[in-house]
Amino acid sequence: MKVGKEKIWSEIQRSFHIDESRQKYCIQLAGKRLRGFRSFLSNKFLKDEEGKFVEAKRPMKYAEIISAEEWDNFVAKRRNEKFHEVSDKNRKRASKPAYPYKKGRTGYARLQQRILAEEKSDATSLPEHVLWKAARVGKDGAVVEAVQNVYDECETLSQTLPSTEVQGCRSLLSRVLNVPEYFGRVRGKGFGVTPSSFYKKPKTKNPTNKEVMETLAELRAQVLELQKENARYREERRGSEAKDTSDRASINCQPKFPEALHLVSCIYRHQLIA
């Protein structure tokens, strides 16, 4: 039952063609399915109809994926008192949520798509508190006062907080609800949405080799044109002044174009390598 992440990913790739960028999401989804499988084993084989623990042998149906040692460790953990305390606490909290979700099996992602489609919006996502409120609207369209109050506070807070603080490690929603933002997820966005993906900063686009070479060619052409203008200027000076004066003036006035061209070349070679 205990399998490394790399092993899980390799098995997934054997059956499906999935881009490497989706590895983290797939591993998270596999972890969710594993937790569900453990709950199934516990309810099916370790408890009776009244929910009390009973003596149970390893189910031979799953003998190929669950060793005898893994089964014994699993049973011992499920019988542990600390495990029961945490389980009971979470069960009570889930049975009476302060702000119940009212969209059934429709997750945040599909709900967001539906809202954007209905509004014919060009946006790619909704603010988390907007989506959170929409997920708690009943079939009659009514909004519970407590939910509306949270939404209003989020709207007010979004106008007072600097943008750098709004897109920090805690969302507006978690601030208003006064609850911690758990690692690896954004409250009000659903499974698979992480802070790194939701608050990601736009990457600065580096110029391609072709773009660098084109820019360098333009600069070279500009430098050559300046050199020609400078040569014409020297010829005009020679015709109006004495030779020594003209030569001295041209030496003093001539910009160091070869050196400048070399400097530009070095800069763009460095960008090509970087």
Image (cartoon, rainbow, N blue to C red):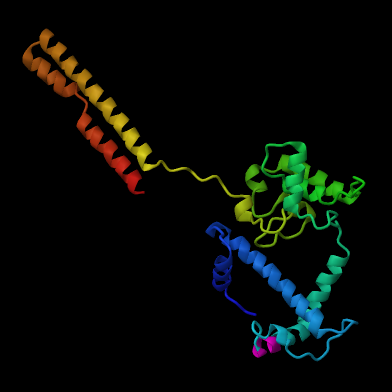
Whole-percent x, y for residue 215 in the image: 34, 33
Q: Is residue 156 magenta?
A: no
Q: Nearer the viewer, residue 224 or 48?
A: 48
Q: Residue at x 53, y 59 (%)?
A: 20
Q: Is residue 219 above or below residue 52?
A: above
Quadrant where the N terminus is found in the figure: bottom right
Q: Quadrant of residue 71?
A: bottom right
Q: Is residue 267 above or below residue 23?
A: above
Q: Is residue 234 above or below residue 32?
A: above
Residue interval drawn in magenta: 68-73
The dominant secondary structure in magenta is helix
Whole-percent x, y for residue 49 in the image: 89, 82
Q: Please give left or right for residue 249 compared with residue 219 in the image.
A: left
Q: Please give left or right for residue 103 compared with residue 224 in the image.
A: right
Whole-percent x, y for residue 76 in the image: 73, 87
Q: Residue at x 77, y 76 (%)?
A: 40
Q: Nearer the viewer, residue 122 or 180?
A: 122
Q: Nearer the viewer, residue 238 or 125?
A: 125
Q: Residue at x 68, y 39 (%)?
A: 123
